[in-house]
């Protein structure tokens, strides 16, 4: 276990004016609070905060952050309080410790919705001060190093959480070494067999090529000395998880992998980076397509370096990374490498001039616009895992996108409005399909239209969370607008029949009565059938009274198709439109009220029937007229590819009269004397007619009864079904639609 004086010495090496008193005070406080607590390994608990603090000293963080590391478990696991820490160490440190306590309570591997909401809380906590993230990542790293002492089921959960969230997050923040170690530790617990197999093969390769890394280092170093370039060369064999991931993503066997060795060349300044590249390329052959210049186009996490792969010494494929000392520091420590976090400047807010934290700023922006936590989780995980391509606008603006991104992703990355109005694209001056996958260096020009609405199918094409979120939002808005228009017409008809006029302003003061906060939401709910137009009428005019009307059928009032079976419906026939007027001489609608019986175009119901309150559609049957079906009817699937035969049909309940409607109900009942009588008596007592009954014995003890019933409306039917279910002789009662 690390000693306190060793920790102070580590900080003193990079910060000579270290506040030793603060570190000693934090250590003593944590030691007192944790007391005799032990970890799963049996070690004193204080060893954990000490090791977390030691990890942060490798990043050269200030003493305030080191103190937070020493204190990070005190509020959660001891009697310490936020007020006590504020008093002893200041509000800045107190806020950081409390932020870490909140994150520790999160369980990121749970049901998807809860996981999404917890990830939101994690990132929002981080947004207040980046040091919360740095301490949390160090805490997770030490926990992963000691994971062998945890129970197997919990071990797997923690490893999965680390692989899914914390390792990619470390990578996004630019801390590549930490990401690699977190991935490596998770890999060996999540897929032990693969880890051991790859590790064994690497060990065999190391024995076979003994000393090859040192040999290549020496040859490179001697080459730079010969050319008069001051450079520091270090090499390493790639880690098992990095190799396994490459084998998986590219469907390669171990034998097919070639660049298993990586070397870093550290030089003094920017010019020397390109000079070193020229020296290497002049001496050895370059592998085509394996050159990337992240100095001229840095990654979004501030990573800058030149990558190239050569057929180097000993005819080995060698991957080289060429960078300055400062670039190397940022590559190793990411956001922690910025001076803002090294200087004790109080609250570490998001630095506007740092690209290293731009992704998190962008992600946090999504929190204010996203209404669905699961969409947010999907968006964040997509952004965490994807590699990047760099493209340009016609004006030269650089846009970084995940690999595999399309012009639609590009359009949404520039601005949501550009994405919503995108209809075409020019890539490098040529018109290309919107499904084209973008490549590094592409110049992308978006062609727009003012009347475009993003098709829902785009959601399957795009790869960025921002684009997917915007397409879903636009689709929902378009559907809502459609339902709102339909709902407004339905409400207008209801008010017209009641002799009233409806306006949106009338609805605003009474929204609370119908359980809505927004006028358009309420109107759209009417269009979707979730809210009755009568409820809206009574909310605005509570004194309005209406009675069920009995309509006498006369020869002069037989309706359009003279069909008694269509009473209580209005519908629109393709190719016909006729506006009618109400008693106040106002145009109402071109949907026609259907009453009466007989006529040239029959209207009938499907076998399962339909009752007022059902959402219904009409199907034009050639030579037979129009058949009405509930929207739940499986029969409708036969007409999916025949949209011209679908008719817009709606109930006109106030004009329905005193007629009954057919509905089909199946009752599973005990096979014993008196059962049928009890069921029939219950149906009769509910003021329901039995039009037809069939009975089938489905087992020794049970009989299935299928009733065709005459009911007033959906409410009447639902009440009857509920009553039937309550009978002691009935095991189940359900409505069927076919």
Image: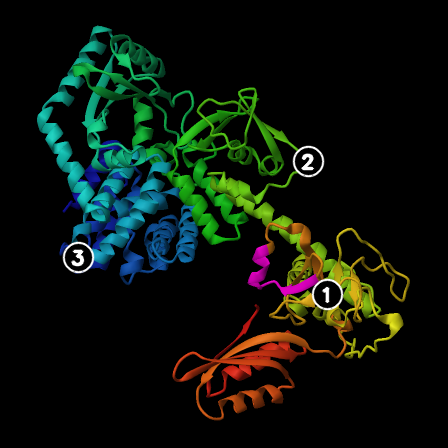
Residue at (23%, 28%) from the top-left corner? 257
C-alpha separation, residue under disc 1 versus residue under disc 3: 75 Å
- Tell me the distance, in whole angstroms, between the alpha carbons under discs 2 and 1: 42 Å
Q: Which residue is mark 2?
A: 450
Mark 3 or mark 2, which is nearer to you? Answer: 2
Task: Decide: few, some or many residues near mark 3? Use Cα within 10 Å; few <14, some 14-19, many ≥20.
Answer: few
Element carrying mark 2: loop
Which residue occupies the extreme bottom position in the image?
A: 674
Q: Farthest residue toward the right?
A: 585
Closer to us: 340 or 628: 628
Q: Earlier in the sequence, mark 1 or mark 3?
A: 3
Label 1 residue SS: strand
The magenta span reads 626-638
Residue that sits furthest to the top in the current view: 227
Residue 40's disc number? 3
Q: Where, by quadrant of the figure, is residue 277 drawn?
A: top left
- For residue 39, which quarter of the picture? bottom left
Question: Which labelled disc corresponds to residue 603?
Answer: 1
Gap in Å between the C-alphas at discs 3 and 2? 63 Å
């Amino acid at each position: 276990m690390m000693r306190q004086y060793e920790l102070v010495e580590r900080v003193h090496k990079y910060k000579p004016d270290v506040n030793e008193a603060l570190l000693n005070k934090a250590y003593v406080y944590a030691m007192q609070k944790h007391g005799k607590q032990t970890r799963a390994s049996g070690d004193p608990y204080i060893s954990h905060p000490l090791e977390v603090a030691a990890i942060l000293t490798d990043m050269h963080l200030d003493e305030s952050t080191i103190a937070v590391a020493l204190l990070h478990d005190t509020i959660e696991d001891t009697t310490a309080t936020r007020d006590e820490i504020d008093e002893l160490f200041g509000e800045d440190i107190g806020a950081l410790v409390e932020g870490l306590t909140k994150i520790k309570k999160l369980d990121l591997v749970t049901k998807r919705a809860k996981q999404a909401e917890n990830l939101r809380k994690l990132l929002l906590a981080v947004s207040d001060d980046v040091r919360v993230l740095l301490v949390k990542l160090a805490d997770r790293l030490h926990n992963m190093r000691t994971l062998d002492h945890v129970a197997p089921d919990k071990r797997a959960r923690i490893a999965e959480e680390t692989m899914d969230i914390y390792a990619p997050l470390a990578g996004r923040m630019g801390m590549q070494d930490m990401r690699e170690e977190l991935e490596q530790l998770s890999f060996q617990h999540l897929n032990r067999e693969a880890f051991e197999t790859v590790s064994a093969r690497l060990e065999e390769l190391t024995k076979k090529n003994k000393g090859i890394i040192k040999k290549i280092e020496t040859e490179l170093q001697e080459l730079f000395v010969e050319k008069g370039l001051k450079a520091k060369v270090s090499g390493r064999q790639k880690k098992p998880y990095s190799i396994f991931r490459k084998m998986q993503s590219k469907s390669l066997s171990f034998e097919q992998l070639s660049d298993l060795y990586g070397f870093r060349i550290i030089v003094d300044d920017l010019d020397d980076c390109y000079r070193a590249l020229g020296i290497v390329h002049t001496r050895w052959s370059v592998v085509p397509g394996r050159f990337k210049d992240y100095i001229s186009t840095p990654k979004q996490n501030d990573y800058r370096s030149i990558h190239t792969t050569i057929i180097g010494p000993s005819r080995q494929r060698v991957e080289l990374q060429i960078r300055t000392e400062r670039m190397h520091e940022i590559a190793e420590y990411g956001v922690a490498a910025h001076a803002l976090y090294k200087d004790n400047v109080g609250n570490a807010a998001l630095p506007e001039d740092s690209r290293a934290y731009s992704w998190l700023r962008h992600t946090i922006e999504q929190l204010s616009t996203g209404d669905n936590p699961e969409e947010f989780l999907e968006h964040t995980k997509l952004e965490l895992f994807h590699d990047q391509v760099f493209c340009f606008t016609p004006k030269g603006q650089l846009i970084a996108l995940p690999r595999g991104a399309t012009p639609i992703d590009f359009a949404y990355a520039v601005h949501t409005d550009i994405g919503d109005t995108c209809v075409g694209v020019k890539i490098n001056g040529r018109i290309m399909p919107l499904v084209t996958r973008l490549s590094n260096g592409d110049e992308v020009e978006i062609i727009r239209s003012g009347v475009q609405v993003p098709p829902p199918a785009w959601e399957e094409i795009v790869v960025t969370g921002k684009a997917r979120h915007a397409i879903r939002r636009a689709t929902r808005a378009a559907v809502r607008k459609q339902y709102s228009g339909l709902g407004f017409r339905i409400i207008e008809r209801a008010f017209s029949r009641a002799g009233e006029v409806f306006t949106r302003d009338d609805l605003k003061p009474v929204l609370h009565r119908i359980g809505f906060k927004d006028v358009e939401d309420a109107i759209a709910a009417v269009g979707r059938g979730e809210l009755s137009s009568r409820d809206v009428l009574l909310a605005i005019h509570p004194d309005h009274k209406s009675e069920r009307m009995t309509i006498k059928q006369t020869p002069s009032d037989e309706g359009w198709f003279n069909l008694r079976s269509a009473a209580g419906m209005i519908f629109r026939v393709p190719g016909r439109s006729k506006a009618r007027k109400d008693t106040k001489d106002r145009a109402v609608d071109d949907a026609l009220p259907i009453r009466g019986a007989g006529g040239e175009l029959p209207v009938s119901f499907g076998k399962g029937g339909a009752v007022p309150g059902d959402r219904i559609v009409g199907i034009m049957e050639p030579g037979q007229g129009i058949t009405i079906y509930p929207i739940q009817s499986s029969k409708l699937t036969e007409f999916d590819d025949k949209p011209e035969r679908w008719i817009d049909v709606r109930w006109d309940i106030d004009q329905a009269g005193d007629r009954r409607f057919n509905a089909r109900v199946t009752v599973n009942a005990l096979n014993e004397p008196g059962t049928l009588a009890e069921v029939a008596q219950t149906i009769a007592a509910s003021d329901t007619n039995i039009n037809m009954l069939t009975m089938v014995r489905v087992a020794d003890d049970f009989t299935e009864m299928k009733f065709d019933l005459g009911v007033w409306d959906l409410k009447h039917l639902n009440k009857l079904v509920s009553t039937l279910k309550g009978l002691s002789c009935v095991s189940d009662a359900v409505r069927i639609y076919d």
